[in-house]
Image: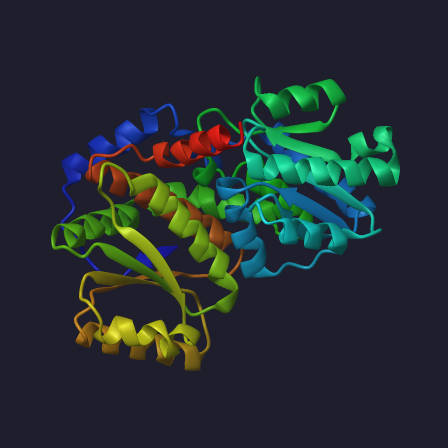
Amino acid sequence: MIKVNFNAEVDEARAQKILAEIKKDKMGGWMELPRKYDMGEFARIKEAAKKINEESEYLVCIGIGGSYLGHRAVIEALRPKSETKIIYAGNSLSRRELEWALAKVGDHDFSINVISKSGTTLEPAIAFEAFKKKLVEKYGAEEATRRIYATTDAKQGALHDEATENGYTKFVVPDNIGGRYSVLTAVGLLPMAVAGVDVDKMLKGAAEAVETAVEPALNYAFMRYALDAKKYDTEIFASFEPSTVYFNEWLKQLFGESEGKDKRGILPDSVIYSTDLHSLGQYLQDGRRNLFETIIDFPTDDLNAKIVAAVRIAHTGGGIPVLNISVTSFDEKGFGELIYFFELACAVSAKLIGVNPFDQPGVEKYKLELHKLLG
């Protein structure tokens, strides 16, 4: 269960109106997803994960942004045990990184999970071509086809068409769920299942959060709204677990892409303590007072608990508002709850400042300019 240590002034009428708007939105499908998941597809995901585990030493997950950050966050945080290792590709245009990933796979048995709603995003498209070529060279065209799993649009798009034409195993990126809200769809569930994450337990945690996370999520959203009105325009997400660095990265994408529009939105940043107490900690203690801190408090040992308490006392005393969000378990259930909590709080936060939580026009502008430069 998610708990917060603060009480915002929640306008209940406005909150309920916003919740209804999100639920009716064409991109609000994630709100009821944990309780209404397509169990037929869920069974196919687990069956595919079993097959990949049996025949591959590596699964190459190809995607960028919402197509990879969420499941990488969970896998790296929980460090589950699986004979099949996950390698990430297609999340940058670095030739060095692509060559490193190809060399890492080497002559080992591997499969590919390419994740893209359209199939035209440049970074994953380049990586997919490189790994597909390696797959065909190693296994031949027919066996290579069996080892490609495409998570894409249900009806259209370049990747959908290629997968249909070649007979790749397909999973769906739902039309009513955007990338950064898609962790609990096949986008995230297949890689997590392959890595050894208990996806049943994760969905159970998220399903419970549909009921239990609403009140704390509204509290958090309205608290952020109040702080923004007082010119606290930067939020520092703080964790005391080094393995959660990619969870922080997912949070930065979630809030940055959802809120950062029309010259509005709180700038999201992150730290990992106690490491960053010896670097950015100085700025947080004595720098500009335009920021607030949100501590994600996982169950921990006594020493870390004392560090959490010391940070809260020091930073509050230094003039920083410090919010505390705690989750009861550092496991699949806890992360299922936490993911749903932040998705809901983020969507409400965006609505409070009058922007669309589900589009990303700035990202599309960069893509357009890049395509122009590439001819």
Number of numbered discs overlaid on the protein picture: 0
Q: Relative to residue 261, is residue 184 drawn left or right?
A: right
Residue 71, position as x, y percentages in the image = 55, 48
Q: Relative to residue 268, is residue 58 drawn left or right?
A: right
Please say if 106 is above or below 309. Answer: above
Q: Nearer the viewer, residue 3 or 357?
A: 357
Q: Nearer the viewer, residue 272 or 312?
A: 272
Quadrant location of the N terminus? bottom left
- Residue under the point 32% across and 24% down: 24
Q: Relative to residue 283, is residue 330 drawn left or right?
A: right
Q: How is the image coloured?
A: rainbow
- Residue under the point 22% across and 41% down: 263
Please say if 277 is above or below 342. Answer: below
Residue 28, position as x, y percentages in the image = 38, 30
Please say if 56 is above or below 351. Answer: below
- Residue under the point 39% across and 45% down: 254
Residue 301 in view in this figure: yes
Residue 343, position as x, y percentages in the image = 38, 43
Q: Nearer the viewer, residue 211 or 81?
A: 81
Residue 358 in view in this figure: no
Name the quadrant containing residue 214.
top left
Name the quadrant containing residue 231.
bottom left
Q: Relative to residue 199, is residue 245 drawn left or right?
A: left
- Residue under the point 19% across and 61% down: 290
Residue 36, position as x, y percentages in the image = 49, 31
Name the quadrant containing residue 294.
bottom left
